[in-house]
Image (cartoon, rainbow, N blue to C red):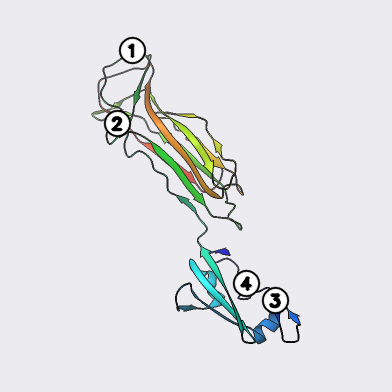
Amino acid sequence: SKLGINAPWKIYDGLNSVTDADKTEHKDETYYNAHVQVSACLKGTTTAIDPATLTANAGTYTLTYAYQGVSRSIDITVEEKALSNHSTFPSELNFGTHDISYEDQSYDGLDQGKVAQGKIDLTDTRGTNDEGEGFTLQAQCSALNDVTNSDHSLDCSISFDTSNLKNSAGYPIHSAGKTVDLKAGDKNETQLIKADAGKSGGETTMDMNHFKLNIPAASHKSKGVYKGTITWTLSNAPK
């Protein structure tokens, strides 16, 4: 069985009952205290721990009950209940050097010289039964300013496609749609995915690809080198 760190725990929680020589079944804690011996150790070792503090630290423990010469052991895993983020994002997005154009233009992004891509990878083990407590992932693109003249900014957006949204437990995960478009300099965050409380457990993954810089024909353009930042924000509850 599995428990969270510091989860409520009593040393006889792993015991259903005991039957004495007269075939009388006992289930009460008072009887256990008088007749049942309890010990615990880190699984695979002889390192003893106090059974009463079993949930104090993460690990897998072997709990042994001994009664009238008979012993029974069970393994209990204590794990940290958490929302873990193993996502990968482009380390950089380089859209190259281009002539000024007065037509709509889209330029593909490269990451360290390779086609830019990323992957959302979130694991939620929170909740009594690992059902999760919900989360939201959002993104925001700063203004793209000329590195030599911060008064000049590029009227543009950065977009990317999403695909293969999955949750290992089969929970429904809400997404922004196939294509996400981040307006440069927009003060508002764009929601990428959201999971409801009680429906976010397990691993949630989603691919990101086809990163593009989009510049409208009518936008003002000045010669320069423009840089900005995309901020990815994970909240440990739905918004």
Q: Which residue is mark 3?
A: 17
Seen in the picture, residue 142 relative to 80 is either above or below; the reply is above
User: Which tag, 4 or 1, sits closer to the chain's start?
Assistant: 4
Identify the residue shown where x is 25% and y is 27%.
Answer: 225
Q: Position of residue 237 (x, y in %)?
A: 55, 47
Q: Which residue is mark 2?
A: 94
User: Which tag, 3 or 2, sits closer to the chain's start?
Assistant: 3
User: Which tag, 3 or 1, sits closer to the chain's start?
Assistant: 3
Q: Position of residue 159 (x, y in %)?
A: 42, 28
Q: Which residue is mark 1?
A: 102
Q: Position of residue 75 (x, y in %)?
A: 55, 70
Mark 3 belongs to which amino acid?
Ser
Mark 2 belongs to which amino acid?
Asn
Question: What is the distance, in whole Å, between disc 2 and disc 1 at their CAs?
Answer: 21 Å
Identify the residue shown where x is 45% and y is 37%.
Answer: 207
Q: Which element is circle 1 on?
A: loop
Which image quadrant: the N terminus? bottom right
Residue 215, picture quadrant: top left
Crowd tier of the residue under label 3, counting other residues whose Cα lies within 10 Å: few below 14, some 14–19, many 20 or above = few
Q: Which residue is mark 4?
A: 14
Question: In the drawing, does residue 147 fall left or right of residue 170?
Answer: left
User: Which tag, 4 or 2, sits closer to the chain's start?
Assistant: 4
Viewer-nearest of labels 3 and 1?
3
Identify the residue shown where x is 76% and y is 86%.
Answer: 22
